Amino acid sequence: MEQFLGFAIPGIPYGCTYALFAVGLILTYQATGVFNFAFAAQAYTSAFIFSILTLNEHWPVWLAFFVSVVLLAPAIGLAFDYFLFRRIPNTNSMAKVVTGISLLVGIPSLLTVIFTNQPFYNVPSILFNPNDVYFHLFGLQDVPINGIFLSTVIVTAVVLVAMVVLMRYTSLGLKMRGAVESRRLVQLDGINADRVVASAWAISSLLAGLAGVLLAPQFAQLQPENYITLMVTAIAAAAWGVLRSMPTAALVAIGLGIVELTAEGYLPTGGILYDSVLPVLPMIVLVAALLFVPGMRSLDDTKDPLASVDPPTPPTAAASRAPTMDKIIRVAFYVLLVAFAVSMLTWMPRTWEGVFNQGIAFSVIFLSITLITGMGGQLSLAQATLAGIGAFTAGQLASHFGLSLLVGGIVGAALAAGVAVILALVSLRLKGLGLALMTLAAALVFDQAVFSRTAVNGGQSGLTLKSKWAGLGIFNPNGHALFVVGVAVLVVVTLAILQIRKGTIGHYLGAMRGSETAAAGIGINLTWQRVMIFALSGAVAGIGGTIYSLFQTNVNANSFNAELSLVFVVVVVTTGVSTVEGAIQAGIGLTVIEQLVTYLPGRFGGNSLVFVLFAFGALTYASHPEGVLEFQKRTWTTRFDRLFFTKGSPPGLAAARDGGPSPGTALPATGVGPHE
Amino acid sequence: MSEVPGVVPDPSSGSIRGRTPTGLLGDPAPLLMVRGVSKYFGGIQAVREVTFVVERGECVGLVGPNGAGKTTLFNCICGQLRAESGAVEFAGIDLGRMPTYKRARLGIGRTYQRIEVFPDMTVREHLLVAEQARRGEGRLWKDLCNLSRPSSDERGRVEDVLELIGITDIAGTPVSALGLGLCRLVELGRALVGEPQLLMADEPSSGLDVHETAELATVLRTLQKERGMAVLLVEHDLGMVGECVDRTIVMDLGQVIAEGTFDEVMGDPEVRHAYLGTTT
């Protein structure tokens, strides 16, 4: 018994840290309708500033706490609300998730860019000294109660009670619950909904800051990954509370902490349970909640009664330009393409040839996001994982059987498609946020339990590929042959996607994006379409993963982890998720910017600057869901259109050229806002 | 409840499962048979033991105050909700646990109380996609080989429907640029393009002005007479109901309280009580 308590009781403070995060996530979701993926980044920000002020500037702890938590944390929340989430329609769950992920990726990178990559160790505690043992529970020597235990348990209890009282028994809580349904509708009742929601953001952000600073002393070194890992477990707990019940979430969180520590104590180290199952326990709990808690399937069912006042998605640049201009742009595109190919094969410096080869590999992976998100309307956070499945399969087949990497890549693509199909079948009833969480859980499971195994990854440094497995002379990252093969794959995949998009399946997917209810009502088999788009997306990601590993001459788990899946989504959303050129621009753009950043002095943050650029670009998703580049293209197309081709007539209305009313014909009254 | 002809016997008197789908073989079995359908939402019984039939080529009005369970019943018939008990038979086929898309392909077309359109599409694309979906088109290899373009027949049928409901002039317009009334017509066209045997219209006149409502009633009548299409019409505009329907079913609090001709049910004290809260 003493041994059991010795394992289980230390799990309580771990559970409380999960609970603190879970309560914060639920508060934000309950009060604002946003599942705040950026919560971990907010916590890290406060902890980071607190560490600078205490460790570098030697401020007193209370003053550093006041600045980093009481002042800064709510200010960040208010900025989130004012500049971002206030502008996203309630019903646009995709935009809310993407914005949160962008902040999660972008904020830690921004801190690195601003303050450079400073390591912080032994961050001071705001309450009790973490190293002091205050007493032994039940008088047992194996159950010491130290400062970390006391701090987390006390703060969690106080926060939980305060938040439950706020939401259930106060007028502000009632208004928050009303505003989450429809901010605009509540305003019609005379409530200043903006102020109510801003209050919610300030309080939840204060909670994030408090959690960040409170937990900082627990980590040997302060790193954003610490908080992201914590958040994943907290999400699992929050899911069992259906993102509504704080007490349930807190109980599940504490239970998880106890089970983790107890299992860790009893399980033999080095066994499969210890190595592969224990690390994914929170993901298993999350998947179970998504599958078996009915409320998690209907998270996005809320419909804002005033949703019809939102403007429609604007047409793409390609759909809105004049035929003459369209012809000129097409010709220019082909000329540039040929010039690019000739340059790559003749005078392009080897370094830049490698940059573009890597960009082409990324482009193929990113096209899988175009398929599943742009065309299928489903947000998957596991695309890097699917790419990894393709790459590891090809690498292992080559390593064990000497199979050509290109052939192995096709097998890998099939396997990635198979995994994607399983993912689609498991998450058939999920959409929006639920699907995003399911795919994120799958990605983390592969990270912790599959890609981390030596039998798969070939050891610490990854699976090193050999030139004899590649053939065709493509085993050279900066070589012409890899470029030719990469471009050939890219062209085939692009043409296939374009054909699908303009074909029947493309139209079915368009119908499903608009209304699944009506799509089923006209005879579309939603299950089949969804499974098919997942399979196609998985296959394309798998192929892209193999091409990328050829570029790297190595298959490494770090190249295909869950965090990269998030980055991939952010990058593609920035350029344009609904068009194939968006994915290609994202792939090439990412590598070109990465290369350009290497020419800058190190103080600009290196790769962190790249993440910042794309993450903050993705923040415009709410106002420009077609992507920043696509928006700029459309804007400039319209300007040129007006200037040279359609003088005097209103720009853009592709419908008019597609058999609709001619320019000037009055359309029926719509109540719809302007397109731009 | 009023005694009316056409009401099927009590559901407990015999199962319709196992019956030969004689409707498809020319048997004069009713087109739609709803028997003892019930649907609960938690503790609320939204639909209680509802039983009725719709004959081929018949226009039946389904009316009742808000919350009567009309749309829930529609959803149970279309398969968007699963009834807790009872059976739905279409053209002699027990729909059982058949998914929505298969019911649609059998020949059930539907419009929605709350507009359900595809904002990325033009009006014409709405009808084309419905035309292809109803016939189960959509093979990946066809798309990849560029063989899935709509045939001239399909385009022709779409143009016919556009003309029938008078929206040819906006065929190329994205629906996101249309107002509520026109969106309702697009929904109607989308439902009609597959030439369904049964059209289930859920408050189709909502959002239309008096003139448009009258035109819609004419279209429904034309469809019924010229194409032999049965119509099940949920509508609050009782004037339109009176003009269109052959028979009216009145629901209140989840159950059928009256059935008969429009004039008969409107004179029923129970119906007056349901609508007005008084029997006088």
Image (cartoon, rainbow, N blue to C red):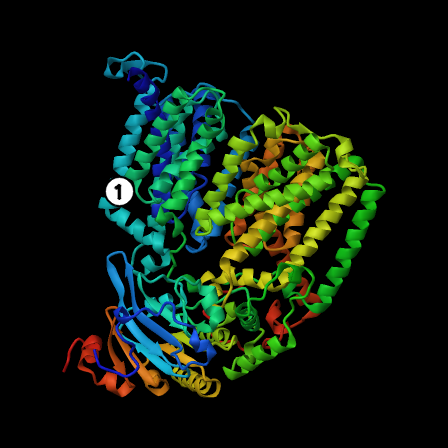
Q: Residue at x 65, y 62 (%)?
A: B143
Question: Where residue A118 sits in the image (x, y, percent)?
Answer: 53, 24
Residue at 35%, 84% (x, y): give it.
B245
Position of the N terminus of chain B, as image quadrant, is bottom left
- The quarter of the image holding the C terminus of chain B is bottom left
On screen, residue A548 above or below B84: above
Which is nearer the eye, A288 or A135?
Answer: A288
From this viewpoint, is residue A44 visible? no
Along the line of sight, the residue nearer the viewer: B74 or A310: B74
Instruction: Say whether residue B56 is visible.
Output: yes
Mark 1, chain letter? A
Q: Residue at x 34, y 46 (%)?
A: A30
Where residue B6 appears, as percent x and y from the top left, is 30, 81
- Relative image position of residue A611 (x, y in whole percent): 58, 38
The quadrant where residue B95 appears: bottom left
Q: Which residue occupies the extreme top position in the image?
A: A141
Seen from the viewer's position, the closer of residues B127 and A401 is: A401
Decide which of A161, B59 is in the foreground and name it: B59
Q: Is residue A483 left or right of residue A591?
A: right
Q: Which residue is mark 1?
A: A166
Disc 1 secondary structure class: helix
Seen in the picture, residue B95 relative to A413 is either above or below; the reply is below
